[in-house]
Image (cartoon, rainbow, N blue to C red):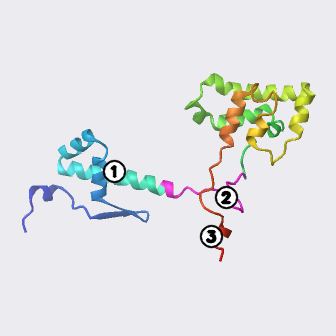
Amino acid sequence: MELTPDEAVVPVLQEFVVIGGRQVSYDDLTGFIQDQGIFTSQTFSALQPEERTEVLYAAREILLSIVNGLSSIEALRDEVNNASTEGMPPCLPHELLALKPRDVLQLVLKFHDRLLASWNQNAIDLIVDQHKKLLNAVIKEPRLQTALARHNEQTDFSEAWRTPSIKDRFPELMEFCGGLASPFPPTRPPLKVIFQF
């Protein structure tokens, strides 16, 4: 059997490749590359066969790595299949009263890189500053202290931050806490519903 020049330099691609229990066909990878637009499709087509093979190998590694990474994400659920709040940082005004400014600073530093993606440094600095002002306001304003004392673990985030003189005075602190308190919605029915007869 005589090899054509293309077969001599290009390793033979199997129809499917399997990595981490996932499989993808090289036809699908080629289609994915072509789906990226005219420029990408034309550039890919203009490559030498061995270069196309390298691109397909690279695309395979990237895509399967992404799929395997996404597949390993596991939602934390409580016993009734709601988003778990275990390990959730304090997010409500009355919970923040138990924190020292250094605790809030550590929380801000933990998420600093993420905050910089959509906040400027001045706004980030205001988070800790507003926490200090909240602590002082509660000491100086008995009505505020009384209002926050009514809150408990059953208090809704929106309700807690609607407390008079909280939302308008501490907007960056409220927005930061809102980001911390944003769990995902339930994605499947509770197990007891699945197994009902």
Considering the numbered disc 2 on the image, is that residue within a helix, a strand or a loop?
loop
Residue 81 pos. (x, y %)? 67, 60
Label 2 and label 3: CA atoms lie apart by 16 Å
Looking at the picture, tell me which residue is in the foreground, 131 or 82.
Answer: 82
Q: Residue at x 62, y 24 (%)?
A: 121
- Find disc 2 in the rendering and name its residue: 77
**Residue ID for mark 3:** 194
| N-terminal label among 2 and 1 | 1
Examine the rendered structure and indicate whether residue 26 appears above or below residue 91. below
Q: Position of residue 31 (x, y in %)?
A: 28, 52
| Residue at the disc numbered 1 | 59
Q: Amino acid at mark 2?
A: Arg
Q: Residue at x 25, y 40 (%)?
A: 38
Residues rendered magenta in the picture: 69-85
Do we see residue 172 in this rendering? yes
Residue positioned 71% across, 47% down in the render: 88
